[in-house]
Image (cartoon, grey):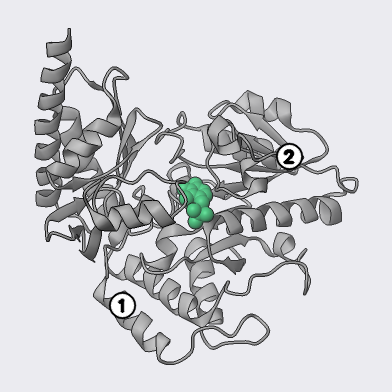
Amino acid sequence: MANPVIERERLYGAHNYEPLPVVLTRGEGVYVWDDAGKRYIDMMSAYSAVSHGHCHPRLVKVLKEQAEQLNIVSRAFYTDKLGPFLERVCELTGFEKALPMNTGAEAVETALKAARKWAYSVKGVEADQAEVIACAGNFHGRTITVVSMSTEPQYRAGFGPFTPGFKIIPYGDVSALENAITPRTAAFLVEPIKGEGGIVVPPEGYLKACEAICRQHNVLMICDEIQTGLGRTGKLLAYQHEAIQPDGVVLGKALGGGILPVSLFLTRREVMDVFTPGDHGSTFGGNPLAAAVGKAALDLLMEDQLIERAARMGDYFQAQLKRLVSPLIKDVRGKGLLIGLEIDEKYPARILCLKLLQHGVLTRDTHGTVIRFAPPLIITEEQIDTAVSALQKVLAEADAEVKEKQ
Ligand SMILES: *Cc1c(COP(=O)(O)O)cnc(C)c1O
């Protein structure tokens, strides 16, 4: 590879990623620039972490001001920033309590710990017997406990032994949930739309039916909204499309305003109160810098009406994608600005992403066949049009290549 920056990263870094060959040096709004000054439109938003756009001036201002004031003190002391952040997120989501972490996987682990302890101390499950039900094709993060729930062979191979206590059921299948529940079931953990699993939208009414079953059997329903939450799908939380009220929710990614890792587990008082001092924690979780940026990210989401915007622009984007004519397109799906374009397996989606890169559009495939379109929520119709016309060109090139081979 010619670029020395890429060579250095490859030489000294672990090869746990395979980035597209572009070196990014700057970002602003929906755009990023490479080391040669070429501009790209960002259709990835760091897997939804950059919903507010790159380097949002208001968030950068909050970051700078807080950075000069106070950053890390650990949770051994109170700070003036954590309370207001937690209050704001509870107010917005309707949950009573929130526990701050940094990354998504940590917040998922927090949800699992809360559910297990709740099962023992409130539901009355026998010690060490609690089970959590998760769905096939899930993505909840990369720690050993979290990949213990994964059904993706590569996420697991070579990393065993795994944490016991998980049961896997097919996604979108209500009776599978009902059949999997036993008196030992603590929780059902579910993504309202599968993100890394290929932007998979479950059948309408699925979440509502799962909620009813969980209620009936005294099982906690916990939604992983790390990717779908905070406006991405056109609602504050994606489960609101079905007007349900789960027992808990996990947030991350966009909560950090595209600047810092900030995550939370939110739940009812009865569940959160299972934690007592010393049970669980994180040196950095809830630090004043993260809390200040997290609160500002929430405020901005509401004040700039980014949720309504995601709904409107998402409809527009999907409509434009559905008008594209190519034998390679198998499906266009998603909600709001979380959109997947499924490509026929006979053409590698990764190659399409490489071609899009040349046309100034950044995105990645998930699962080899689905191209993700999840731009910052601030995107405009004109910017969507630009990306769609680049896609149109790239698909035409690919169609021609496929025909030539035949
Ligand atoms: C990204 C993601 C996670 C993991 O978040 P990290 O910050 O990478 O640990 C968990 N669940 C879902 C649904 C995600 O999209």
- The residue that appears at 29% across and 20% down in the rendered structure is 344
Mark 1 Cα shell of 10 Å, populated few (<14), some (14-19), many (≥20): some
- The residue that appears at 18% across and 58% down in the rendered structure is 34
- Residue type at the position of mark 2: Pro
The answer to whether 277 appears left or right of 75 in the picture is right
The answer to whether 251 appears left or right of 185 in the picture is left
Q: Nearer the viewer, residue 306 or 398?
A: 398
* Label annotation for residue 235: none
Above or below: residue 267 compared with residue 388: below
Q: Nearer the viewer, residue 150 or 324?
A: 150
**Residue 231 visible in the snapshot:** no
Q: Measuring from the top left, give residue 335's x and y in whole percent.
A: 34, 41
Give the residue at the far bottom of this rendering. 69
Per the image, the residue denoted by label 1 is 60
Q: Which circle's residue, 2 or 1, is located before the other in the chain?
A: 1
Above or below: residue 51 compared with residue 315: below
Per the image, the residue denoted by label 2 is 161
- The residue that appears at 59% across and 31% down in the rendered structure is 151
Q: Measuring from the top left, give residue 168's x and y in whole percent.
A: 65, 31
Does mark 2 have its CB less than 8 Å from ligand 1?
no
Q: Nearer the viewer, residue 357 or 290?
A: 357
Hey, which quadrant is residue 157 in on the image?
A: top right
Task: Give the foreground label among 2 and 1.
Answer: 2
Whether label 2 touches label 1, CB < 8 Å: no
In the structure shown, which secondary structural element does the residue marked by tag 1 occupy?
helix
- Residue type at the position of mark 1: Val
- The residue that appears at 58% across and 26% down in the rendered structure is 170
Q: Measuring from the top left, give residue 40's x and y in whole percent.
A: 16, 53
The answer to whether 338 appears left or right of 224 in the picture is left
